[in-house]
Image (tube, rainbow, N blue to C red):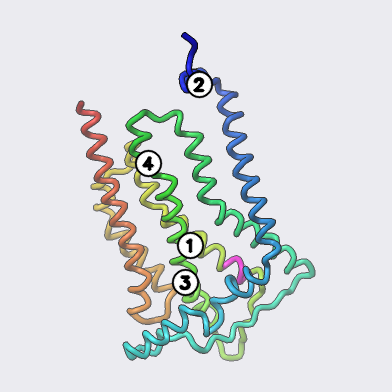
């Protein structure tokens, strides 16, 4: 009786050599890079929307977050929370500065939009090496990791970026020194903060795999909860105006994310202990 396609596929996956694995990985990387490049080219032709309506928007006082913070400031009678007097001037000081920045931003946008597909390619590469139970438990990893990353991007863009731009853009060591921010400096700040928080929101996914391989335990995370609280409070104090309410706005989601990571670690740790005991 001839082998079915699925059986031949499983057999070929089991018998793949080291170089065949590298070849397989290469094609996953190639497809991911192609997706990024294609989306980057699309983003390149929509520069007015990407720059004027998205990237440069948080510096304006009429940005949606800044307007909402002003309304919240009026409601709570906390004037420091309102961002209504931004006068940040962005300049370009290099001949090729705007073009190179345009290229850089297009690639970043391409990567962010292609992120779910990149995660899918990574998952497709490691999936054959997983056991049936592991495939079942991690079947939603692509969707969950993509949603967490997008949530981190949105949270950073609509809250942390405006607060950061307001703080750093208006901070003065002397009234005789005016802030004229270079385009590259502004873009690097927005991109690093936005992308960084997007990666931070992947913490539950990282904790899942670290717990799975025995690197992290729920007790370790609980034991270091106080240190994480201090780190989050310090970061919030740096990027927000000097008031308690704005710090709370940043702290709560990050602390909730850490608690979610502890919950995920506990569930995986119990399953791991049961499997080892059985």
Q: In this figure, which residue is indicated by the disc labeled 3?
A: 158
Location of the C terminus (image quadrant): top left
Q: Do the residues under discs 2 and 3 have CB atoms within 8 angstroms? A: no
**Which of the pair 128/258 is nearer the observer?**
128
Q: In this figure, which residue is indicated by the disc labeled 1?
A: 153
Choose top left, top right, bottom left or bottom right for residue 75.
bottom left
Q: Which mark is residue 5?
A: 2
- The residue sitting at 41% across, 82% down in the picture is 69
CA separation, marks 3 and 1?
9 Å
CA separation, marks 3 and 4?
29 Å
What span is in magenta? Answer: 185-189
Q: Secondary structure at mark 3?
A: helix
Q: Is residue 186 magenta?
A: yes
Q: Which mark is residue 175?
A: none
Q: Do the residues under discs 3 and 4 have CB atoms within 8 angstroms? A: no
- The residue sitting at 56% across, 56% down in the picture is 113
Q: Residues within 10 Å of mark 1 (few under 14, many from 20)?
A: many
Whichever of labels 4 and 1 marks the residue nearer the N terminus, that label is: 1
Residue 45 as seen in the image, left or right of residue 275: right
CA separation, marks 2 and 3?
49 Å
Which of labels 2 and 1 is toward the front?
2
Q: Secondary structure at mark 2?
A: helix
The furthest residue to the right: 95
Q: Residues within 10 Å of mark 4 (few under 14, many from 20)?
A: some
């Amino acid at each position: 009786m001839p082998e079915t396609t699925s059986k031949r596929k499983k057999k070929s996956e089991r018998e793949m050599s080291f170089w065949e694995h590298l070849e397989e990985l290469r094609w996953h990387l190639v497809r991911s890079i192609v997706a990024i490049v294609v989306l980057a080219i699309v983003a390149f032709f929509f520069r007015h929307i990407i720059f004027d309506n998205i990237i440069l928007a948080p510096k304006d006082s009429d940005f949606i977050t800044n307007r909402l913070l002003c309304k919240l400031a009026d409601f709570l009678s906390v004037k420091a929370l309102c961002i209504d007097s931004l006068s940040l001037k962005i300049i370009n000081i290099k001949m090729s500065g705007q073009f190179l920045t345009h290229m850089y931003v297009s690639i970043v946008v391409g990567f962010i939009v292609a992120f779910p597909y990149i995660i899918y390619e990574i998952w497709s590469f490691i999936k054959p090496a997983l056991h049936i139970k592991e495939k079942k438990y991690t079947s939603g990893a692509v969707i969950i990791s993509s949603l967490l990353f997008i949530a981190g991007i949105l949270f950073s863009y609509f809250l942390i970026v405006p607060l950061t731009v307001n703080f750093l853009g208006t901070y003065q060591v002397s009234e005789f020194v005016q802030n004229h921010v270079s385009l590259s400096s502004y873009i690097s700040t927005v991109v690093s903060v936005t992308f960084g928080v997007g990666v931070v929101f992947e913490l539950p996914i990282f904790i899942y795999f670290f717990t799975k391989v025995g690197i992290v335990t729920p007790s370790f995370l609980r034991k270091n909860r106080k240190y994480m609280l201090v780190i989050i409070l310090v970061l919030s104090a740096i990027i927000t105006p000097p008031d308690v309410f704005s710090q709370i706005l940043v702290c709560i989601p990050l602390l909730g994310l850490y608690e979610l990571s502890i919950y995920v670690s506990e569930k995986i740790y119990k399953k791991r202990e049961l499997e080892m005991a059985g």
